[in-house]
Image: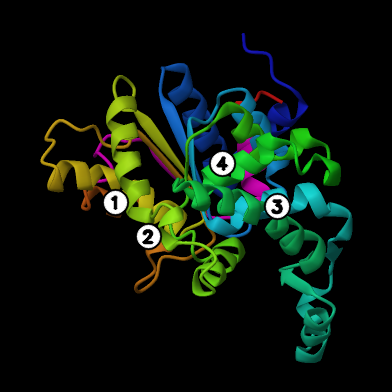
Amino acid sequence: MISRGPISQFIEKNYLHFNSAALVDAAKGYEQHLEEGGKMMITLAGAMSTAELGISLAEMIRQDKVAIISCTGANLEEDIMNLVAHSHYKRVPNYRDLSPQDEWDLLENHYNRVTDTCIPEEEAFRRLQKHIYKIWKDADDKGERYLPHEYMYKILLSGDLEQYYEIDPKNSWMLAAAEKNLPIIVPGWEDSTMGNIFASYVIKGELKASTMKSGIEYMTWLSDWYVKNSGGKGVGFFQIGGGIAGDFPICVVPMLYQDMEMQDIPFWSYFCQISDSTTSYGSYSGAVPNEKITWGKLDINTPKFIVESDATIVAPLIFAWVLRY
């Protein structure tokens, strides 16, 4: 008999219908996939790092409940920003009532708002910029090239940022990932604050664009990783939100099958998406999982789940179940 903590017991007793039942089904499917020897990719869209998903995700990483992560550049950097500047963040619980003037005042005071949370420019963006630039410049001078997350791993493992830590380091998923050297895919990294800052140095002639490896190199790396890790039970796909964090990596399977003509490449062997996007015209994020069958991403027998709810509520609960809290 598996021993479960109070959160899991509460979920099992109360979450019996509709989206709550879908949450339980997805959580049990995730757990079964791992128990049968499968591996799991988690994809992070939106602003899940600023929503402090690291509190639960970091432990998932430490306990080997996730084998690889795909995330936006914003999620990559914002977990580190929260690590080094948490006390300077400003919460705006009445964000729905803000006027354009209120928003302008936040800008003038160097706060960038993410829903109900404002990231402090000086203590977060600029503090990280000062240190990451040295890492970029050192690689540039040596003619070395790395992927975006590898530079972040370098700065975290160097210890240079420890002087700024403002949260318990165990709640930083990026730090947990760096310590494990967890594979990370960061499609569209250029669409992030650090990506914009890197581009500014390229424009000023201080860094070469080639010092940063590209999205195509992420895809070629992922294709090799998938081939090596998709045997047996295979690799599952746990998608938080929509967008490029999920769209990019899921395509590795049809690419290998159709373009590389690898006829025996396995489909993703589990699929769950947490999304509050409704299925509508042109809304890929709101597409039901079955649509992915036609694109060669999921098999007809792949366990498929969709939880139409707020990921900041759902993801920590599913992780709690998998961790048996």
Q: Earlier in the sequence, mark 1 or mark 2?
A: 2
Decide whether residue 165 is among the magenta residues: no
- Name the residue tied to disc 1: 292
Mark 4 secondary-structure assignment: helix
- Neighbours of disc 3 within 10 Å: few (<14), some (14-19), many (20+): few
Q: In the picture, residue 6 is in which quadrant?
A: top right
Q: Earlier in the sequence, mark 1 or mark 4?
A: 4
Amino acid type at mark 3: His
Distance in Å between CA atoms under marks 1 and 4: 20 Å
- Name the residue tied to disc 2: 287
Q: Earlier in the sequence, mark 4 or mark 3?
A: 4
Q: Quadrant of the N terminus?
A: top right
Q: Is the residue under label 2 in contact with that under label 1 (CB below 8 Å)?
A: yes
Amino acid type at mark 1: Lys
Mark 1 secondary-structure assignment: helix
- Name the residue tied to disc 3: 131
Amino acid type at mark 2: Ala
Q: Which residue occupies 84% across, 47% down?
A: 164
Q: In the picture, residue 178 is in which quadrant?
A: top right
Q: Give the mark toward the camera: 3 or 2.
A: 3
Q: Which residue occupies 83% across, 53% down?
A: 86
Q: Which mark is residue 177?
A: none
- Name the residue tied to disc 4: 23
Q: Please state the horizontal and vertical placement of residue 287, each as a whole percent of the image.
A: 37, 60
